Amino acid sequence: MDADELLAALNELLEAERAGVRVALAGRKTASTETMDAFMTRLRDDEARWCAMLAGQIERLGGSASSQCGAFYDKVMALDGTVQRLSLLNRGQGWVVRRLEALIPRVEDEVLRADLREMADSHVENIAATDQVILDMRSGAA
């Protein structure tokens, strides 16, 4: 993978993570319980962590980090209801995992590859946690 292709992929992921941060922030504003607020805060913090990692790696590799937010934010916010938004957010998290799984084997830089692996694993954990929140909401437990 050449440097330009790698930097473009990292910036695409950065924009997607930034959209995730904004979705989680919006979710906190509409959270009806302390549990939901805490969940959205954890999600926001995790997404922000990956934004910082990606921006740092892009700059370390000699690129310029995008300042754009992915269009995914508008897609999620166009939906009514927390369950619908969380469901789409989870599909977006799945997209990130698939992109990372395709990208990681092509990355030669060991430090970046380790960071991307950790990011993928974190997103898999977030998907499971979000699935549980959705299930709890649908069953009335949340």
Image (cartoon, rainbow, N blue to C red):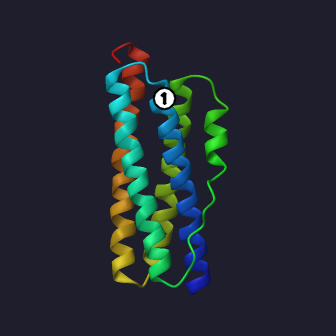
Q: Nearer the viewer, residue 80 or 138?
A: 80
* Type of amino acid at the residue the image marks with label 1: Lys
Q: What's the residue at 49%, 32% (across, down)?
A: 27
Q: Nearer the viewer, residue 65 or 101?
A: 65
Quarter of the image for the N terminus: give it: bottom right
The x, y position of residue 89, in whole percent, is: 52, 40
* Quadrant in the rendering for residue 128: top left
Q: How many marks?
A: 1
The x, y position of residue 95, in whole percent, is: 54, 53
Q: What's the residue at 61%, 37% (across, down)?
A: 76
Task: Tell me if residue 32 comes above or below residue 42 in the rendering.
Answer: above
Q: Nearer the viewer, residue 111 or 51?
A: 51
* Quadrant in the rendering for residue 84: top right
Q: Judge from the rendering whether residue 131 lies leftward or rightward of residue 4; answer left or right.
A: left
* Quadrant in the rendering for residue 140: top left
Badge 1 crowding class, 10 Å Cα cut-off, few under 14, some 14 to 19, many 20 or more, is few
- Per the image, label 1 sits on a secondary structure element best described as helix
The x, y position of residue 80, in whole percent, is: 62, 23
Q: Judge from the rendering whether residue 40 lies leftward or rightward of residue 1; answer left or right.
A: left
Quarter of the image for the C terminus: give it: top left
Q: Name the residue tied to disc 1.
A: 29
Q: What's the residue at 37%, 38% (across, down)?
A: 41
Task: Tell me if residue 103 comes above or below residue 74 in the rendering.
Answer: below
The x, y position of residue 28, in whole percent, is: 45, 31
